[in-house]
């Protein structure tokens, strides 16, 4: 039952606005001036660690958040003033929260929030107040925000996961528009750039899918499955199915475009994909606005026109095997339209038979054994998490030394800036560094006018409420904006405390610049990421993920189509490892001067890896067709294909070598001898896709060997 249609952004930001307003009223009513800063910062800390979950999960997260925040704040309160003890505490905390964050997003969020609370305790420390007041106000602020999020959750329990599924469809629509560009014969000369752009767009799709999966997973852990959750799960699975189909490669685009450049068939394909992308966008908007998805009948008309155009093309080229590839391509695209049409008829509840397949893979880390195993695996400098943990710990020690040695008043803004700016890799740090400095300078310039425009307590509290809310609004989308508003909030808070804000303006800027400079030095000279950018290792892991995906596809080709958890997990892992490779190449692209000689090879590996996933996805999209195929010699043919596929899977899991290249060449010759005779679509498509995989693997293996030979071992 739909209660009310409210914009998602309003729902997400309402707890922050209301909690800051309540806190401001309490400060004004009780004249709790000295306690105001800690109370406001406690609310902000609560907002930064808020995680989507079902009700019991939220309550559990709040409990552990309050426990960790209390311990962290009290530890700082008792150690502050004892420089060595305090520095040791902050160093240890910086290392532990980063290291523990390797477990999963829940641990990472609460742990980092605890570190922020420690810094907030330092910044609001006042020796004239009783020792428990700062920790108490910080906890009260966090508790106030958390209780309001519970109230919002009770009113809109499914809204977060519905929004994440909507974002998945929005990213899927963007991805499909990029893919539509592959069917423009006038732009086919820029195919390599399009493939790189598609791989980068795929990264955003997989990230949005993972966010949706997380929200659905926590809701499905309860014994009671709400009908709306089941419906979102169906939408999520449909998006994955569409993604697999649109990712598949059934033709070689360059030859295909030249082959059809003087027909309208290729333009009809492009037009239909664009309409499908628009339908995914409409689906996203329908979810955001809590409306029913309405299927666009233009998809049916466009699909019918495409079929008629292909029938004419088939009649003109009756004996060409290339027709089979075109036919499979069109069949695959039309299946996407059918999937979109089914979305408009999704039922509110699932039948018992449906429930057996409507399961979602569990989180990758569950239980103490997995937690300890994960933490142990990150106790090495090969781990970016461990490097960042040590780096952040050293940054903390240096910041504490600077503050204590020079006796800087409020100098721990340096540490706060360093912790917030310093990211696991160089490119992310430099981007955030620039945004932080820009936002702080603008915030200081505007904030310097606060005493003139808001001389009263009421006006200053209003600025605190508005600026804190806007900080929360922009914290994930516009970091420079969020820094600007949090600077305003801080300066207004100083004014409330009766401090001379003009005296703190220059200090705020200088502390930000020093902290940002320390963060830049840390990522540049303390185990810099370019010494550990493992292109070969990342590419090999991506290849191993593709092997698991191919193995699942082949199993289903032999034993029957089933969209079960193992299949979806293998597909997800393959795409996630492809995203890891995309991230590596993206980091190298940002620092083009450092990787000038290595970038072309990195781009080639990314392009080849995505071509491999596309070929495997094409096999996945014909699972049902193959299993329904019967006829003379079918079993013998499938057994031969299975043997070839199993050998490919084994080679994709093994380290690169010259022997691997020789074995792939042998498999290629074996496949050529197994080419199906006659035009039987399903067999020919299976054979041709395996042949395409072999060709790409030969090129992939050659690129890996070239990288190792030119640049030594694994590191680029």
Image (spheres, helix red, strand yellow):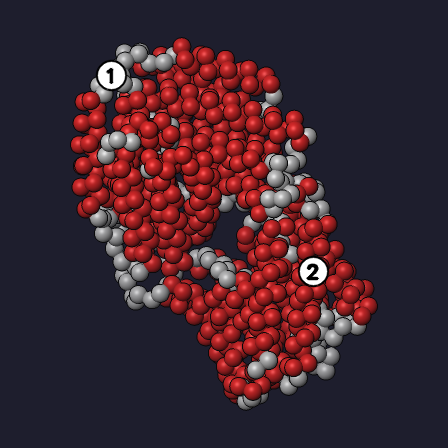
Count how many numbered circles sit on residues in the image.
Answer: 2
Q: Which mark is residue 319?
A: 1
Give coordinates of residue 181: x percent, y percent. 36, 40
Query: How many neighbours does mark 2 have within 10 angstroms: few (below 14), some (14-19), or many (20 or more)?
Result: some
The residue sitting at 27% across, 37% down in the picture is: 267
The residue sitting at 57% across, 41% down in the picture is: 584
Height in image: 80 above or below 128? above
- Gap between marks 2 and 1 measured at Cα: 68 Å
**Sooner in the amino-acid sequence: mark 2 or mark 1:** 1
The quarter in which the C terminus is drawn is: top right
Is there any visible trace of residue 16 in the rendered image? Answer: yes
Contact flag, marks 2 and 1 (Cβ < 8 Å): no
Question: 680 and 374: which one is in front?
Answer: 680
The residue sitting at 43% across, 70% down in the picture is: 14
Give coordinates of residue 518: x percent, y percent. 71, 59
Is there any visible trace of residue 93 in the rendered image? Answer: no
Q: Which mark is residue 517?
A: 2
**Quadrant in the rendering for residue 291:** bottom left
Q: Is residue 341 left or right of residue 449?
A: left
The residue sitting at 63% across, 44% down in the picture is: 593
The quarter in which the N terminus is drawn is: bottom left
Q: Which mark is residue 542?
A: none
At mark 2, the secondary structure is helix
């Amino acid at each position: 039952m739909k209660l009310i249609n409210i914009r998602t952004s309003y729902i997400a930001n309402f707890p922050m606005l209301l909690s800051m307003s309540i806190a401001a009223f309490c400060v004004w009513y009780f004249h709790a001036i000295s306690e105001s800063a800690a109370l406001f910062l406690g609310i902000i800390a609560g907002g930064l660690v808020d995680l989507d979950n079902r009700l019991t999960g939220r309550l559990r997260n709040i409990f552990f958040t309050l426990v960790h925040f209390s311990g962290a704040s009290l530890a700082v309160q008792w150690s502050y003033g004892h420089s060595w003890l305090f520095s040791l505490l902050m160093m240890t905390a910086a290392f532990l929260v980063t290291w523990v964050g390797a477990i999963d997003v829940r641990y990472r969020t609460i742990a980092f929030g605890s570190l922020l609370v420690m810094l907030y305790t330092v910044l609001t420390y006042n020796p004239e107040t009783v020792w428990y007041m700062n920790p108490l106000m910080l906890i009260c602020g966090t508790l106030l925000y958390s209780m309001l999020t519970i109230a919002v959750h009770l009113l809109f329990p499914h809204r977060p996961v519905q929004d994440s599924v909507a974002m998945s469809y929005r990213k899927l629509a963007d991805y499909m528009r990029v893919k539509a560009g592959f069917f423009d014969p006038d732009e086919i000369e820029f195919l390599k750039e399009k493939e790189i752009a598609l791989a980068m767009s795929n990264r955003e799709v997989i990230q949005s899918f993972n966010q949706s999966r997380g929200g659905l997973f926590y809701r499905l852990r309860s014994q009671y499955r709400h009908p709306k959750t089941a419906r979102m799960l169906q939408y999520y699975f449909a998006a994955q199915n569409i993604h697999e189909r649109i990712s598949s490669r059934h033709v070689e685009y360059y030859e295909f475009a030249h082959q059809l450049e003087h027909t309208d068939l290729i333009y009809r394909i492009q037009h239909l994909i664009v309409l499908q992308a628009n339908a995914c966008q409409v689906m996203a908007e329908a979810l955001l606005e809590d409306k029913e998805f309405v299927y666009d009948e233009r998809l049916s008309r466009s699909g019918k026109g495409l079929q008629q155009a292909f029938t004419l093309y088939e009649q003109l080229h009756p004996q060409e095997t290339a027709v089979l590839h075109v036919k499979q391509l069109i069949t695959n695209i039309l299946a996407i339209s059918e999937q979109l049409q089914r979305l408009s008829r999704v039922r509110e509840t699932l039948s018992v038979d449906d429930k057996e397949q409507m399961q979602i893979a569990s989180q990758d880390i569950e239980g103490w054994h997995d937690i300890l195993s994960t933490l142990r695996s990150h106790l090495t400098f090969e781990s970016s998490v461990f490097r960042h943990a040590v780096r952040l710990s050293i940054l903390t020690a240096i910041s504490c030394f600077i503050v204590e040695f020079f006796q800087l008043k409020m100098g721990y803004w340096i540490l706060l800036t360093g912790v917030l700016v310093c990211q696991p890799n160089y490119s992310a740090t430099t981007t955030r560094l620039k945004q932080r400095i820009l936002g702080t300078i603008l915030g200081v310039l505007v904030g310097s006018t606060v005493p003139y425009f808001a001389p009263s307590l009421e006006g200053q509290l209003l600025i605190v409420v508005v600026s804190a809310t806007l900080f929360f609004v922009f914290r994930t989308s516009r970091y420079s904006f969020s820094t600007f508003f949090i600077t305003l909030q801080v300066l207004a808070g100083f004014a409330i405390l009766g401090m001379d804000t003009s005296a703190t303006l220059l200090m705020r800027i200088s502390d930000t610049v020093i902290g940002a400079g320390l963060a830049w030095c840390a990522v540049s000279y303390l185990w810099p990421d370019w010494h550990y950018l493992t292109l070969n290792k990342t590419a090999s892991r991506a290849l191993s993920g593709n092997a698991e995906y191919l193995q699942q596809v082949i199993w289903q080709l032999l034993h029957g189509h089933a969209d079960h958890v193992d299949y979806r997990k293998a597909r997800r892992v393959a795409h996630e490892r492809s995203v890891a490779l995309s991230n590596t190449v993206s980091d190298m692209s940002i620092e083009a001067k450092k990787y000038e000689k290595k970038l072309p090879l990195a781009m080639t590996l990314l392009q080849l890896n995505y071509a491999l996933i596309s070929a495997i996805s094409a096999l996945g999209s014909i699972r049902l067709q193959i299993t329904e195929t019967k006829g003379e010699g079918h079993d013998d043919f499938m057994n031969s294909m299975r043997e070839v596929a199993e050998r490919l899977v084994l080679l994709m899991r093994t380290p690169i070598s010259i022997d691997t290249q020789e074995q792939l060449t042998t498999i290629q010759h074996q496949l050529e001898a197994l080419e199906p005779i006659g035009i039987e679509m399903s067999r020919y498509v299976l054979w041709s896709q395996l042949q395409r995989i072999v060709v790409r693997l030969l090129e992939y293996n050659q690129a890996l060997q070239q990288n190792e030979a030119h640049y030594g071992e694994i590191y680029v």
